[in-house]
Image (cartoon, grey):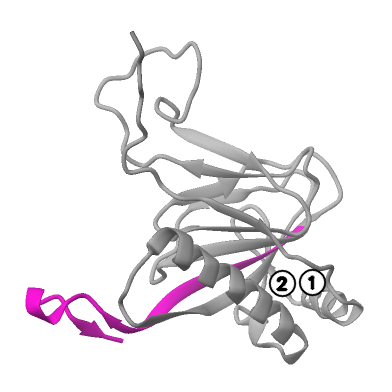
Amino acid sequence: MSIIIHQLFPQPVYFSQLERKLTKEELNTINIYKEKTYKNEGNITSYDNYVLENKTLKNLKKDLNKKVLDYFDKIICTNNPITPYITQSWLNYTGNNQFHHQHSHNNAYISGVFYIMANHEVDKIKFYKTNTPQIELSTTQYNTFNSSSWFFPVKTGDVVLFPSTLMHGVDKKKETPTRISLAFNIFIKGKIGNKYNLTELIL
């Protein structure tokens, strides 16, 4: 007798890689931003939250936008005439004994992280399940059904995209060097819904 367990209504977490190394000019720009930061809840964030509007990062923005389009093509699969676009973008610096608090992103449809410097052996992104079970039982073996959180190792060059409503964060980092990541939000413009269902909205 065969047993089949289906995953119903899963949350997508899209992993890809930037298919090139950052240029010297791009790295210099990112280093300059490190001098203009503030203390966030657990780590350090750039004051500028439209980093990808910097002219020296225009090619990086184009490359990240290609990943966004691929996400929509493979996961959203819509025939609505829409165009996804990157809204805000900012840099996060997480060093020894720092962390990134658990959070989601309001006023965005999809969110992303590009890892400028990350060590696959120690750096991770962690996601959290927000709908807690009514009955709590002891767990002997964790899986994607019974876990309240799940992490993925990340490395330099990784691009991660996920629904903005998905709670995420980073546990306290106990290793060096500093992890540098570029976070960004995505929204859509165009026509969504269906006018005959009275759900049409033009953005």
The image quadrant where one finds the N terminus is top left
Q: Nearer the viewer, residue 75 or 144?
A: 75
Give, as a single range, the part of the protein colored magenta. Answer: 180-203
- How far across and down, in percent of the image, does residue 55 sit? 73, 91
SS for tag 2?
A: strand
Q: Are marks 1 and 2 in contact (CB under 8 Å)?
A: yes
Q: Main secondary structure of the magenta part?
A: strand
Left or right for 178, reference 41: right
**Quadrant of image for the C terminus:** bottom left
Res. 131 image quadrant? top left
Residue 75 image position (x, y, % from top left): 43, 58
Q: Is residue 59 inside the magenta stretch?
A: no
Q: Is residue 19 left or right of residue 177?
A: left
Residue 197 lies in the magenta-colored region = yes
Q: Amino acid at mark 2?
A: Thr
Q: Which mark is residue 34?
A: 1
**Residue at the location (76% across, 65% down)?**
19
Rounded to the nearest angstrom, the CA distance separating label 1 from label 2 is 6 Å
Q: Which mark is residue 37?
A: 2
Helix, strand, or loop for circle 1?
loop
Residue 39 or 127: which is nearer the viewer?
Answer: 127
